[in-house]
Amino acid sequence: MLAYGRQERPGACDGFASNAMPGFCILAGPLPGAVQEDVIMSRRRQIYEGKAKILYEGPEPGTIIQYFKDDATAFNAQKRGTINGKGVINNRISEYVFTRLAHIGIPTHFIRRLNMREQLVRQAEIIPIEVVVRNIAAGSISKRLGIEEGEPLPHTLIEYYYKDDALGDPMIAEEHIACFGWASNEEMQDISSMAIRVNDFLCGMFAAINISLVDFKLEFGRIWDGDYSRVILADEISPDGCRLWDMTTGEKLDKDRFRRDLGGEEEAYQEVARRLGLLENDGGPSEVFDLGAHRKLRGKK
Ligand code: AIR
Ligand code: ASP
């Protein structure tokens, strides 16, 4: 049973911006099961290279391989760097989160993790909207509206940004989305209700490991089944696209460490993975994470 709606394929002249979203359909039928990794490695073709991931053609029609890089960018790629091991950790964290979300009925593109840096996902038409969910003021909303960072918001906010690097991902209203046909009203209903469910689930999941989910970004894709499409959660969920603060110390455990030159980004990403039970406890500090102490322990300044 599908919790979220199926949309009929729009006709050519009904105002839906099909030219903005060149369609590619997935073939109906069962998704591939075990696929030999050596086959994947030898036959694949690169489809797209983004700031933090590379997409390769998958082993079956309708599949894609997501390769997670260590590259980090911020401020629309004006700042560039590397966070060692980030790709491996984000691959693992995103696998874990998407798997848990699937268990509560959120349709996602995730099929399975292939190896340390790659996962197999369903190919979808990416809806060109970044959906940001905020629980606590931080980052751009604090700057834009002069709200102090750390101020809990009176209620959860959903914001939309148009995914366009050349324009710097400008903030948009739902009216823009409807006006330019980036997503239909029905799709936006599915997207906003999924975003709220994901937020509720993730807030609880992170609270259980003493982390506040301050805000995060989601991306959605459209998959076709004949003349019908539905929206699924795509991209990744990792400390690259979430603000995660230790509930006790307020320590930032996310990409703001890189954006704001705070240092300790590798340790912060590892700490999130460790608390989620995805890494062996290496005997380092565990109750409340102290990045300074941890870095000293590892001989870093
Ligand atoms: N985000 C937005 N665009 C790219 C990313 N990663 C995420 C940030 C933050 C949230 O969206 O990681 O968790 C809000 O970002 P901002 O900059 O609008 O405050
Ligand atoms: N990764 C995005 C960029 O390069 C945004 C960010 O995470 O700050 O601009």
Image (cartoon, rainbow, N blue to C red):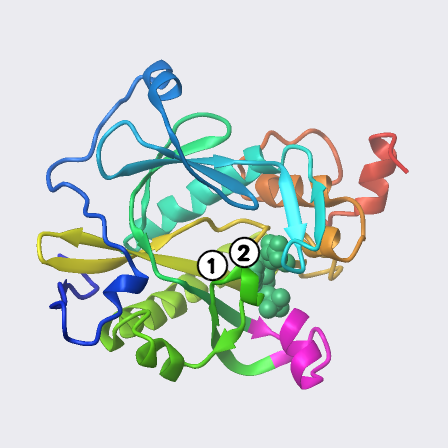
Q: CA distance from mark 1 to mark 2?
A: 6 Å
Q: Is residue 243 inside the magenta stretch? A: no
Say whether mark 1 is within 8 Å of ligand 1: no
Quadrant containing the N terminus in the rendered view: bottom left
Q: Which residue is mark 2?
A: 206
Q: Is residue 145 inside the magenta stretch? A: yes
Residue 239, compared with residue 135, is above or below; it is: above
Q: Residue 69 location in percent, x, y? A: 57, 36
Q: Residue 144 location in percent, x, y? A: 66, 81
Q: Residue 28 location in percent, x, y? A: 11, 42
Q: Nearer the viewer, residue 290 or 68?
A: 68
Residue 100, compared with residue 114, is above or below; it is: below
Q: Quadrant of ligand 1?
A: bottom right
Left or right of 231: which side holds 119? Answer: right
Disc 2 secondary structure class: helix
Q: Nearer the viewer, residue 60 or 89?
A: 60
Which residue shows up at 14% across the image and 73% down it? 13
Q: Which residues are magenta?
A: 135-152
Q: Which residue is mark 1?
A: 202
Quadrant containing the C terminus in the rendered view: top right
* Three-letter code, disc 2: Phe
Left or right of 295: which side holds 118? Answer: left
* Three-letter code, disc 1: Leu
Decide: marks 1, 2 in contact (CB < 8 A)? Answer: yes
Which residue shows up at 67% across the image and 61% down it? 247
Within-10-Å neighbours for mark 1: few <14, some 14–19, many 20+: some
Left or right of 256: which side holds 67? Answer: left
Q: Residue 133 location in percent, x, y? A: 49, 69
Disc 1 secondary structure class: helix
Quarter of the image where one finds residue 241: bottom right
Residue 159, compared with residue 40, is above or below; it is: below
